[in-house]
Image (cartoon, rainbow, N blue to C red):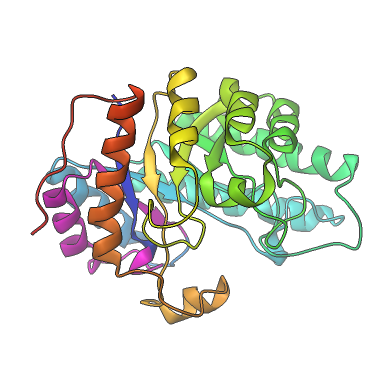
Amino acid sequence: MNKIGFNVLAWSAVVSDELMPITDRLKAIGYDGIECLIGSPDEAAYKRVGEHVRSIGMETTCVFVVGKDENPISEIAAVRAKALDRMKWAIDRAHDMQARVICGPFHSAHAIFAQHAPEDREYGWSAEVLHAAGEYAAQADITLGLEALNRFECYLCNTMEQLTRLVKTVGHPHVKAMFDTHHANIEEKKFTTAIQTIAPLLAHVHISENDRGTPGDGHVDFDEVFSALAQINYPGWLTIEAFSRNDPDFANSIGVWREYSDPWDIAVGGLKLIRQMCQKHGLDKQKTLKHAL
């Protein structure tokens, strides 16, 4: 049975005690878990939030990015070494939260571009760092789910074909792939083909609308997405990733300049959409949406 999560970036990029009442309400709505960005420096907070999430019968997953000074595809070996150190730090924080998945585009620095198409040596550099990170993650039984982003946020991996190449080059059982409907809506020709391409490596899925608002309110073809996921018998998380301007610093960093939908409307409407799609396409016929508080 697929578990359904909600990424709390709709409220905050900071892991702190302020996430606890949000988690409680998401539990009451019917979610199985929350997803948190690993990045804020208060290390003790990750353990506190993780323990709270477990205490109410939920689970956690994590998302993670790297920047220019810790770029796995930098020409400078010392920068690549910093990338590995940062990934190990993120794995430690995810372990503190009792998470089993870290997803995100940490194969390369977010929104850092070169004046060329991705090169073989860049895939090689990234794979070397990620293999070492996979070795470290294996000790905590954590899977690293690499994400392809759209062309405006990344140049190394935009498609499932490119992501497949990278993950196969890494060649580690704890380094796999994720699929995000927002990015695929921009970069892929067909959802079905993309999902079939990444199926042997798929470890995590983000359910995201084209405008990052409520899933089902835009033009992403979720019928095709869920049909394809059912065809490959996808067993993992279905996590909504939607954004707002509740955390201005984070919103500014990713180009969110307006409100798309109220986060609680996204939570209720998005869960309803996922349950309907799972039932319609035979992915999950057992759970039903609970009433929101």
Identify which residue, 158 or 45, lies in the foreground: 158
Residue 154 horizontal/vertical position (percent): 71, 56
Residue 213 horizontal/vertical position (percent): 41, 62
Residue 142, can we see it?
Answer: no
| Residue pictured at 25% horizontal, 63% vertical | 265
Seen in the picture, residue 185 relative to 142 is either above or below; the reply is below
Residue 11, can we see it?
Answer: yes
Q: Is 31 colored magenta in this rendering?
A: yes
| Residue pictured at 42% horizontal, 54% vertical | 241
Tell me the quarter of the image containing the N terminus. Answer: top left
| Residue pictured at 57% horizontal, 57% vertical | 65
Seen in the picture, residue 144 relative to 283 is either above or below; the reply is below
Residue 13 horizontal/vertical position (percent): 41, 67
Residue 107 horizontal/vertical position (percent): 67, 47
Tally the numbered discs.
0
| Residue pictured at 69% horizontal, 40% vertical | 189
Q: Is residue 12 left or right of residue 152?
A: left
Magenta-colored span: 10-38
Q: Quadrant of residue 146?
A: top right
Q: Quadrant of residue 49?
A: bottom left
Identify which residue, 50 or 265, lies in the foreground: 265
Q: Is residue 281 left or right of residue 125?
A: left
Identify which residue, 160 or 165, lies in the foreground: 160
Seen in the picture, residue 196 relative to 250 is either above or below; the reply is above
Q: Is 240 colored magenta in this rendering?
A: no
Q: Is residue 75 left or right of residue 260?
A: right
Tell me the quarter of the image containing the C terminus. Answer: bottom left
